[in-house]
Image (cartoon, rainbow, N blue to C red):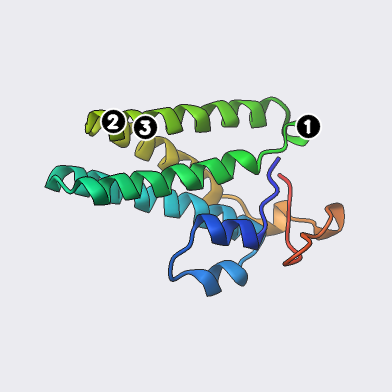
């Protein structure tokens, strides 16, 4: 359902975590994206409460970019209805982030944070040994990691 490479994750989650991204398994990459989105939404809420418009907007943009990367990584052919439903959920989260940014209100941020946290917790429960079989998938052209689940 997902095809995520280190290079695309790195561009979506560009921070001090470059080494972590480049040395991570595909499942860890997805977890990093969720954690990055959660951190960005949390920062957005803090900046909103402090009236820091530019920082709030920047954090919301970062969360939106990460969610966009998660959505782009979905493979509807392999993931079927689950991938379709996740894509719809990601679209909804992006609309909520836009609403929070335009209206400068916290409830959409709180909702997106809760949704992302639920998904992140689910990914934390996935064992890479149970899911990842590199021989089943083509390698990423740049780094050598891509996967499907």
Pointer 3: residues within 10 angstroms few (<14), some, or many (20+)?
some
**Residue 148 badge:** none
Indicate the quadrant where residue 107 lies. top left
Q: Position of residue 129 (x, y in %)?
A: 71, 59
Disc 2, disc 3: CB below 8 Å? yes
Is tag 1's residue or tag 2's residue first in the polypeptide sequence?
A: 1
Which circle marks residue 98 in the picture? 3
| Residue toward you, 131 or 104 | 104
Tell me the crowding category of disc 2: few under 14, some 14 to 19, or many 20 or more residues within 10 angstroms, Cα based.
few
Q: Quickly name the residue at label 2.
A: 102
User: Foreground residue, 145 or 99?
Assistant: 99
Describe the element under mark 1 as helix, strand or loop.
helix
Does dot 2 land on a helix, a strand or a loop? helix
Q: Nearer the viewer, mark 3 or mark 1?
A: 3
Disc 2/disc 3 C-alpha distance (Å)? 6 Å
Residue receiving disc 1: 77
Which residue is at a point 31% across and 36% down the rendered structure image? 109
Marks 3 and 1, Cα distance to the nearest angstrom?
A: 29 Å
Question: Mark 3: which secondary structure?
Answer: helix
Residue 110: image location, x then y, percent = 29, 35
Q: Quadrant of the C terminus?
A: top right
* Residue that sits furthest to the bottom in the current view: 19
Distance between mark 1 and mark 2 Cα atoms: 35 Å
Quarter of the image that includes the N terminus: top right
- Where residue 16 sits: x, y (%)? 43, 71
Position of 93 compared to 47: left or right? Answer: right
Query: Which of the two labelled residues, at mark 3 and mark 1, occupies the earlier sequence position?
Result: 1
Q: Nearer the viewer, mark 1 or mark 2?
A: 2
x%, y% of residue 91? Answer: 51, 29
């Amino acid at each position: 359902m997902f095809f995520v490479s280190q290079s695309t994750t790195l561009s979506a989650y560009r921070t001090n975590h470059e080494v972590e991204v480049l040395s991570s398994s595909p499942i860890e990459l997805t977890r990093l994206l969720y954690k990055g989105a959660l951190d960005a939404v949390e920062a957005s809420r803090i900046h909103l409460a402090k009236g820091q418009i530019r920082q709030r907007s920047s954090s919301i943009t970062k969360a939106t970019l990460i969610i966009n990367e998660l959505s782009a990584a979905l493979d509807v052919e392999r993931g079927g209805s689950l991938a379709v439903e996740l894509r719809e959920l990601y679209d909804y989260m992006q609309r909520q982030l836009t609403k929070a940014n335009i209206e400068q209100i916290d409830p959409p941020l709180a909702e997106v944070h809760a949704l992302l946290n639920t998904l992140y917790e689910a990914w934390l429960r996935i064992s890479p040994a149970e899911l990842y079989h590199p021989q089943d998938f083509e390698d990423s052209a740049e780094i050598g990691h891509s996967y499907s689940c």
